[in-house]
Amino acid sequence: MEPIRMRKIRQIFEDKKIENIPEVIAQELKRIGMDENIKPGMEIGITVGSRGIRNLKTIIRSVIEEVKQRGGVPFILTSMGSHGGATAEGQIKVLEKFGITEESMGVPVKAGMDVVELGTLDNGLKVYFDKIAFESDGIIAVNRIKVHTAYKARIESGLHKMLSVGLGNHKGASLVHSLGVKGLKDYMVEFAAVILRKAPILCGIGILENAYDETYRIMGAAPEEFDKVDSDLLGECKKILPKLPVRDMDILIVQEMGKNISGTGMDTNIVGGVIGYDPDEYTPPDIKRIIVLDLTPETGGNALGVGSADLITKKVHDKIDLNSTYTNTATATFLERAKIPMVMDTEKDAVDLAANTIWNLPGTIPRIVIIRNTLKLDELYVSEPVWEDIGGRADIEAIGDWETIGFNGSGELMLS
């Protein structure tokens, strides 16, 4: 590949955030009538799932305190479907990684895989729900509302998913995922509707984060408001969702991917690969070649999502734990996301091959974007044709001089 000039830029996203989380939670619980609904002595489970949420400990502590102030007896309820190896012990360990323990929260952490059957949908599917949750006096469902990586709809990841998948434990989560996009897009909401009618759901706490993963909004939801809160916050999420600076690229270089970045390693909302959507709901990016240079240490070799790439390095390939990757992918049922792309010895080899297979006319400078990962989109590198498209935008600023893309003696990408 001929030398290419790149420039480091900054994208400016919405950075509004909540300054006083406990105050907002107190206001929301009061607004939706928890003063009357939480009675002294009631044992109330507060859900915590396996997805990373900024300020999670502060949020959960605040909910615990609000329950105690009303005379309730709170406990933390692991709510993560099949995650944590689909065992109670594994799910408790997942929460420990987030700093959520009996010692840190001052309340019991309860976990179990047993479920009760709450009913049957019209199509014959059974609705499963966590036994500990069902036998409690009340449940407060806490979850982040965000776009899903497999489909686009009015309701995606949020409070409904916490009920039907998170509190469905392994049996319920496996059933939803086994039905593919339709199971997630349609049946998940139907499962949650049954749960809302038959389980002791007191309320929900919906969390929306901005592009910098800061707590942007918190909304309380009475049982009859789950639909509105999920859909309203998802609509806001789609408006403030960080994106790549352009839709069309010849080459996207992703320096790292992993489960700690996205459930699909690389967020499909950013790089493409969303499976179920209507054209009016979502426009995928047009990227000719995606290169992945490394896996994050936190992913532990789980490379689910690597199938979205066209090229990976030998470094990535050698770090892949096939058992972890295949187990997670089989549960999710989207097998194409575990396909191994072409493996190149070095990063330079990968970039050279990508540049030679994008079908540009001779002498055309390729449109290249380099990102750290799909969570870190505020600072990135772009080539000259991309800069020409975006250089005058108010949400874009240059934070570096032009530099020629280069590689060290080991063929590793060199950037300032």
Image: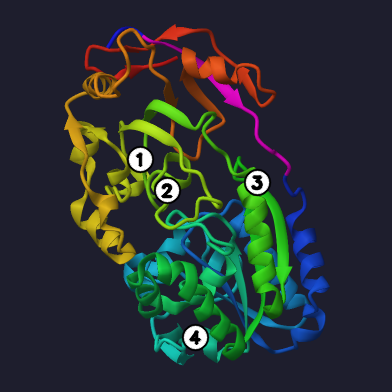
Q: Amino acid at mark 4?
A: Ile
Rendering coords of residue 175 (x, y %): 36, 77
Q: Residues within 10 Å of mark 4 (few under 14, many from 20)?
A: some
Question: Residue 412, relative to residue 200: is it above or below?
Answer: above
Q: Nearer the viewer, residue 168 or 383?
A: 383
Q: How many marks?
A: 4
Instruction: Answer left or right for 55 relative to 125.
Output: right
Q: Secondary structure at mark 3?
A: helix
**Magenta region: which residues?**
4-16
Q: CA distance from mark 1 to mark 3?
A: 28 Å
Residue holding disc 2: 260
Question: How much space separates mark 1 and mark 4, taking CA atoms?
Answer: 35 Å
- Vertical comparison of 9 with 137: above or below: above
| Tag 4 residue | 132
Give the CA distance from mark 4 to mark 3.
37 Å
Q: Please tell me whether mark 1 or mark 3 is closer to you in this view.
A: 3
The quadrant in which the N terminus is found is top left
> From the viewer's perspective, is 63 left or right of 320?
right
The numbered mark at residue 296 is 1
